[in-house]
Image (cartoon, coloured by chain):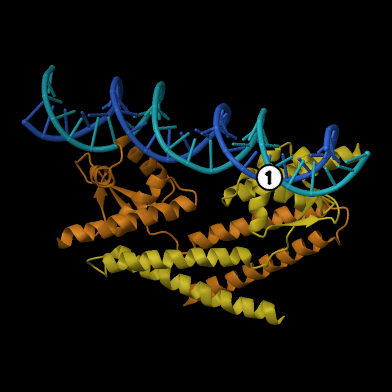
Chain colours: A orange, B yellow, C cyan, D blue
Amino acid sequence: MQDNENRQKQDQLIDKFGSYFGSIGFQPIAGRIIGLLSVSDCEELSFDEITSRLQISKGSASVVLRRLVTEGRVAVVTVEGGRRHYYRLNQQNLFEVLDEFERMCDSVRDLLNTTIDLKADKQSSNARYFYQIINTIDKYKTNMAAMRQAVQTA
Amino acid sequence: MQDNENRQKQDQLIDKFGSYFGSIGFQPIAGRIIGLLSVSDCEELSFDEITSRLQISKGSASVVLRRLVTEGRVAVVTVEGGRRHYYRLNQQNLFEVLDEFERMCDSVRDLLNTTIDLKADKQSSNARYFYQIINTIDKYKTNMAAMRQAVQTA
DNA sequence: TTTGTAGTTCAATCGCGATTAAACAAATCA
DNA sequence: TGATTTGTTTAATCGCGATTGAACTACAAA
């Protein structure tokens, strides 16, 4: 059955989305919902379609969807004069992931700076290693700024 | 007391290391050990110094240290004719974190490609959005390759 | 007003990794 | 050799987020 086969492939993909998003700190269900909304040929799904396709409780779906909506990853569409909610994938800023990575770099940079500050010997092996990391982070950020420029003006 | 104050600051930093490494998938204790080895003025600490300073059980320390050593994040030094093990921070490749990030980008790229493949309408709004993401990832990787070149030749 | 549908809330449970404690093994010292 | 120190192993526990189930609210249709 062609349809059935397709559906199976979709399910596999949905699980891959789930484990990817799981690995970056999302609830597994959140990842699977994003996966479903990404994979599905219909780009707007009702609350009910989501719970039945993913076989999850209404409670989970409600909580997780609210979080995804407030985070801006998913948008709700309410059809006038109906009580059903429809959900679709929100197409976010392409640099969102890079933004987050850069924030992480910043916090590492801070941490290492503070660590060096506290060291008795600023020329110790570790201190010099940390200086190198800070340097690399700075180069990375300069590079990223240039790349963003290039993409924006393109 | 100057020393005591310093020690408190170190403890705070160690916890920050702990929560940073926790956020990227390490056991909290693993992060705190890395923190201690990073912060400590003495760059080689014994098993015992680690457990007593961090107030953790020998069991935890044993398991976590083994993992850190096999992962290459920490090195063991065994002094000839003594039974104590000393541990120090391993200074890894500066691009290690970037490597990991690029691997993640690759897996996202794969996932999105497979997703588009499965779509009935390759021109759908989501499909086009995914194409854009893939494009940005490709640009990012090209850029990173150039940056590595630049750093290596410098 | 009554009946039914849509979604929310929250207490209870489940699952699982992190951590410990204590028995155990291995190496050194005396 | 026996005693002591160093670290390992593993069964048990702890803690906590994820998930469910069922009662509940709100609204809409009849």
- Mark 1, Cα crowd under 10 Å, few <14 / some 14-19 / many 20+, is few
- Is residue A42 visible in the rendered image? The answer is no
Which of the 4 quarters of the picture holds residue B145? bottom right
Amino acid type, mark 1: Ser
In the image, residue B96 above or below residue A29:
below
Q: Position of residue B9 (x, y in %)?
A: 79, 43
- Local secondary structure at mark 1: helix
| Position of residue B33 measured from the top left corner of the image (x, y, whole percent) | 71, 47
| Numbered marks: total | 1
Q: Is residue B148 visible?
A: yes
Compared across the picture, whether B4 is left or right of A72 comes to right
Q: Position of residue A151 (x, y in %)?
A: 49, 74
Look at 80% across and 55% down and name the residue there: B78
Q: Nearer the viewer, residue B27 or B4?
A: B27
Q: Position of residue C5 (x, y in %)?
A: 17, 35
| Chain to which the residue tagged by mark 1 belongs | B
According to the picture, the residue beneath numbered tag 1 turns out to be B62
Looking at the picture, tell me which residue is in the foreground, B65 or C2.
B65
Q: Which is more toward the observer, A82 or B76?
A: B76
For the N terminus of chain A, the image quarter is bottom left
Q: In this view of the protein, which residue sits in the foreground, B8 or B38?
A: B38
Query: Is residue B144 placed above or below B77 in the rendered structure?
Result: below
Q: Residue furthest bottom?
A: B153
Q: Residue at x 68, y 45 (%)?
A: B62
